[in-house]
Image (cartoon, rainbow, N blue to C red):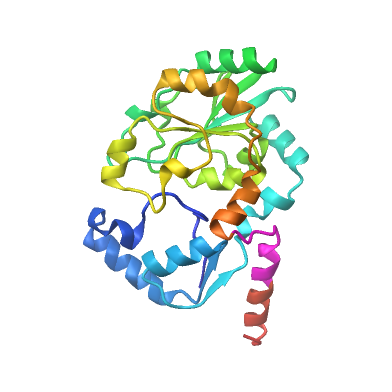
């Protein structure tokens, strides 16, 4: 059993670090699951630390990157971007703003409303490009009735089969406390954090690091989002991939899939 935990470098507290927010049934299930794991994958020193601290797991950890992020580093980005735009009926010349927030404790949707028309107008004015607003909601809260239907300018891609492909196609990300931020950071593309309920989130879930120290512009209101868009979309101050290597001890190489496949092959052949 190889555990390929979906959050590489995550921001929010989870599992044992959020134990007072979890049910006994969940905790018992998580502990039992950890007993069955043969190998846990990690993509950084920081993730390995969190696995040991939070996951009720004391077995072997392979710190060689995560297979699911290989495509972000070594994938054919042009081909993938064309595929995404074709699937979502987006003009090839359009830029994509991806809005991908995480879930809240009450599974509500009140914190996610952004004025897509106003945002698109501002982006088009400050960049001179045509933009499409693509929404990808967390599976815990996704409900098609809560979000705009597809149009030429606003597309609900919550059911798109591979969010990594959406990241590759996107030119700009707006998110909040989701680990999708640190996936997108592998691509060295601009990010804006929109966190209208930061204090509530801190008191409920909390973070495993200093949220304010993250090197991405932050907006706490809709008006701040609009005002910060021009600077955020053109940010070139940092190389986010290099920043993650330095800050987290990131070891992603884009070849984790091959490493894990060889381990599976050796187990099947009785070599491990």
Which range of residues does the magenta coloring cover?
250-261
Q: Nearer the viewer, residue 43 or 170?
A: 43
- Residue at (66%, 34%) from the top-left corner? 236
Residue 254 is inside the magenta segment: yes
- Residue at (48%, 35%) from the top-left corner? 175
Residue 183, image x, y percentages:
57, 47
Report whether residue 272 is seen.
yes
- Residue at (52%, 22%) from the top-left corner? 228
Relative side of 182 to 67, left or right: left
Residue 172, image x, y percentages:
60, 31
Residue 126, image x, y percentages:
63, 15
- Residue at (34%, 60%) from the top-left corner? 15
Quarter of the view holding residue 260: bottom right
Q: Is residue 177 above or below residue 152?
A: below
Relative side of 142 to 45, left or right: left
Q: Quadrant of the C terminus?
A: bottom right
Quarter of the view holding residue 31: bottom left
Quarter of the view holding residue 113: top left
Q: Is residue 125 above or below residue 214?
A: above
Q: How many marks?
A: 0
Residue 54, image x, y percentages:
37, 64
């Amino acid at each position: 059993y190889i555990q390929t935990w979906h959050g590489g470098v995550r921001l929010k507290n989870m599992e044992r670090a959020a134990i007072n927010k979890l049910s006994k049934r969940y905790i018992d299930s998580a502990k039992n699951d950890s007993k069955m794991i043969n190998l846990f994958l990690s993509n950084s020193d920081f993730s390995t630390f969190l696995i040991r601290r939070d996951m009720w797991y004391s077995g072997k950890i392979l710190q060689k990157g995560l297979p699911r992020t290989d495509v972000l580093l070594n994938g054919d980005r042009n081909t993938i971007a064309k595929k995404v735009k074709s699937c979502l009926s987006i003009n090839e010349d359009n830029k994509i703003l991806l809005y991908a927030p995480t879930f809240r404790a009450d599974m509500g949707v009140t914190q996610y409303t952004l004025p897509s028309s106003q945002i698109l107008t501002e982006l088009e004015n400050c960049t001179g490009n045509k933009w499409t607003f693509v929404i990808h909601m967390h599976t815990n809260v996704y409900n098609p009735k809560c979000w705009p239907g597809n149009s030429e300018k606003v597309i609900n891609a919550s059911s798109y089969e591979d969010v990594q492909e959406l990241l590759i196609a996107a030119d700009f990300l707006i998110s909040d406390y989701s680990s999708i931020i640190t996936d997108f950071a592998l691509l060295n593309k601009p990010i804006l954090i929109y966190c209208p309920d930061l204090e509530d989130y801190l008191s409920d879930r909390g973070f495993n690091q200093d949220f304010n120290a993250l090197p991405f512009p932050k907006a706490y209101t809709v008006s701040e989002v609009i005002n910060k868009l021009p600077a955020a979309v053109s940010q070139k101050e940092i190389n986010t991939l290099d920043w993650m290597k330095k800050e987290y001890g990131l070891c992603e190489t884009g070849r984790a899939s091959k490493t894990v496949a060889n381990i599976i092959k050796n187990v099947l052949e009785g070599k491990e």
